[in-house]
Amino acid sequence: MHVLLLWVWALRQTQPASPFAQSAPLAIHSVSANASVVPRYSKLELTLHLTATYENPFDPDQIDVWAIFRAPNGRQIRVNGFLDQPFRRSLVHGREVISPSGNPVWRVRFSADEVGAWTYVVHARDRSGERQWGPGHFRVTSSSDLGFVQVSRRNPRAFAFSNGTPFFAVGEDMCWGGERGSYDYDTWLPKLAKAGGNWIRIWMCSWNCALEWTKEPHGDWRSGDYHGLGVYSLSNAWKLDHILDTAAANHIWVMLCFGTYGELASGGYFNEGQWKANPYNAANGGPCAGPDDFWTNPRARALYRRRLRYIAARYGWRTNIHSWELWNEIPADTPAKVAWHAEMAQFLKGTGAFKGQPADAFHHLLTTSYGSDAVWRMPEYDFTQTHSYGVGTTPDFAPVVHADAVSFARFPKPHLMSEFGIDWRKSDRDYDPKGMGINLHNAIWAAAASGDAGTAMIWYWDNYVDPLNLYGQYTPISRFAHRIPWTTGVWKALSFDPPRMEHGPFHATDLVLPTVAEWGKPRTSTFTLTPATTASQIQLPGYLFGPAKPDLRADITLRVERERPGELIVHVDTVSDRARLRILVDGRVALDHVLSAAPAEPHEYQTTDFRKEWNIYQAHFNRDYSVAIPAGTHTITLQNTEGDWMSISSVTLTAFHSSRFPDVNLWGLTTGSFAFCWVQNAAHNWINVANQRPIPILTGVSTRIHGLRPGRYLVEWWDTASGRITRREYARAGASGLPILVPDLKADMAALIRSARE
């Protein structure tokens, strides 16, 4: 008995003071439903007049409320209850203010997937025992609601609704509002919906809709009425409900992200580290001495599972929740993190140690960022995703998106690039102040043509898309995507003969290969280049890591076939601390050059800055380093043999590319009898447009498409700027493929190709 009392005393010392505590005999006095007849997939909400004894209503060990629903076919579904409170919102001097409009109350929310007569029984348990109420009755009628978004049963790389209707995600990140809070979503969401968008991403972070955070304000990061660890902000929970209601009214689905990497970090480029204010931090009364403890500490894991339970109970009924996302940009790169991701996924899904007891009774899709191969192989994670940014030097994200999609095709799951931008440090508006939207346009079309389950999702929603009114970029891709039968079967990548020009004169031009500035060891570092190779076909790694980062090191190897002699030029952008660029041609050293970021005279760099967070200098070089390459077949190797790392923005082979082969991006998918493709003049990119460089119209470009069954096909050419058909023609596929003559190509266009009866 003394041990038990000591345990209860210790537990109370670690529990935050709760403003929601109650002390009364356990009883369910009444249960009222919002309706007795509910359309299929609509909300049935039960409001409970419940008394009990507890200090913290968010701790199911103190007070557990749930309902068992019985379907017409006899199935039983358990749905957890949750504490709610009504609020109202107002704008005061341009800032959202959320105020209580009633007392806290217990609720249960449910969405029925079957037409007919249902029953339910409500249960409540505190330390004194258990009570139940019921049965209650309601009837479900048919509706036009398509149900929850799932993975297509017929195409494992596509999304579909419960009834099998395809869902192709068209949208953007919309992670938080400004000072106007939820009022910003009142403005943004109708604009996106009117343009054909159907998907956004929202964060639950300390400055937007988080449930738990420290009580005290911490600069600009604080938002909501916080009560500390394990006691949730009902005002933020209400605010998120309001935003989700607005999204549903505009037929927009939401990927809901539960947290971001800054919560478990300090410092950062944007000063985004929040560990000092994190309620899990032992300095704030939490269980974790440091961020790494979050993944292994038993109490921290239990508290996080408790939060997941509340989220699933409150929002799980919503069909417009596209998916749950556990984290924003926390790599699952250690065994502890992998195990944590497995545990939380199994808790939500009711698998593994939680078999048969899903916290999410409605089985929403689940993902995270950044996942690892170990995470993506888990059956509980329904789709993969990546984020990709440049440093302002990548001329076009279309090839980046395509390479990313091809890489993730190794997982038989849908894939999204759920964040991208020209520069991770600043808005795309800095590079596109007139709102031309070239990079946005190219990326969203490339995603569709490369096998992603939705468009690439631009990050800069509030300082680029909305102020420059770029929502219209989504209308053409939305119209086009609605014509594609995504769920009729498995789609495979089309293959194409190298596009070629039939009329000369032809000459050799420089092949300038841009790089992709993605941190980490590259998946591919060996490339074969011929005179037919175009810049858009090759995605070189943007970093050469030195011995200081052995786990990330990978030489870049180029196997080239030169028709005439020329040069290889490496453009070095930034050097961290010190690097040594070594270029080998056929195994022999052609260049061996040290690049130092340290202050010195003389120096090669343009500027250098001391980075306190890493205690090193980083220098901006912006210089070319070249070697001669004779005619013939050669192997060229780029290495960094000293120091930390260097970034390279491009590699150029002079007088290498034959102009007979135009620089065209050409990607597409097929089921064998139906296909579509996107064809782009690769010169039509944001850098060339911004710099007002002439972009030649490509005339007479031809190719052959492989992957279609023999027969006659109707080819519809679409203007991707308007989303309208501009030309129809017939072509016949044979053993050698389907011949295609591309209309005059100034920017880009798309084609739908379907079987035509004789």
Image (cartoon, rainbow, N blue to C red):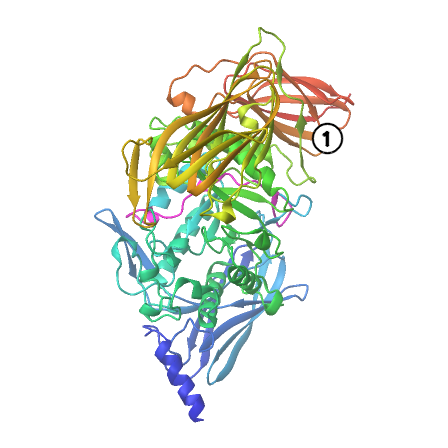
Residue 348 x %, y %:
55, 62
Residue 544 x %, y %:
47, 38
Direction from residue 655 to residue 23 in the image, left or right: left
Q: Of all residues shown, which one is farthest toward the top?
A: 505
**Secondary structure beneath disc 1?**
loop
Q: Is residue 587 above or below residue 502?
A: below
Q: Residues within 10 Å of mark 1 (few under 14, many from 20)?
A: some
Which residue is the site of mark 1?
673
| Magenta span includes 163 | yes
Residue lying at 44% horizontally and 82% vertically, measured from the top left? 26
Residue flagged by tag 1: what amino acid is it? Ser
Residue 361 x %, y %:
56, 62
Q: Quadrant of residue 605?
A: top left
Classified by dominant secondary structure, the portion drawn in magenta counts as loop
Q: Quadrant of residue 99?
A: bottom left
Q: Is residue 608 above or below residue 281?
A: above
Q: Is residue 727 visible?
A: yes
Which stretch appears magenta?
A: 158-183
Q: Of all residues shown, which one is farthest toward the bottom?
A: 1
Q: Is residue 581 above or below residue 740?
A: below
Quadrant the C terminus occupies: top right
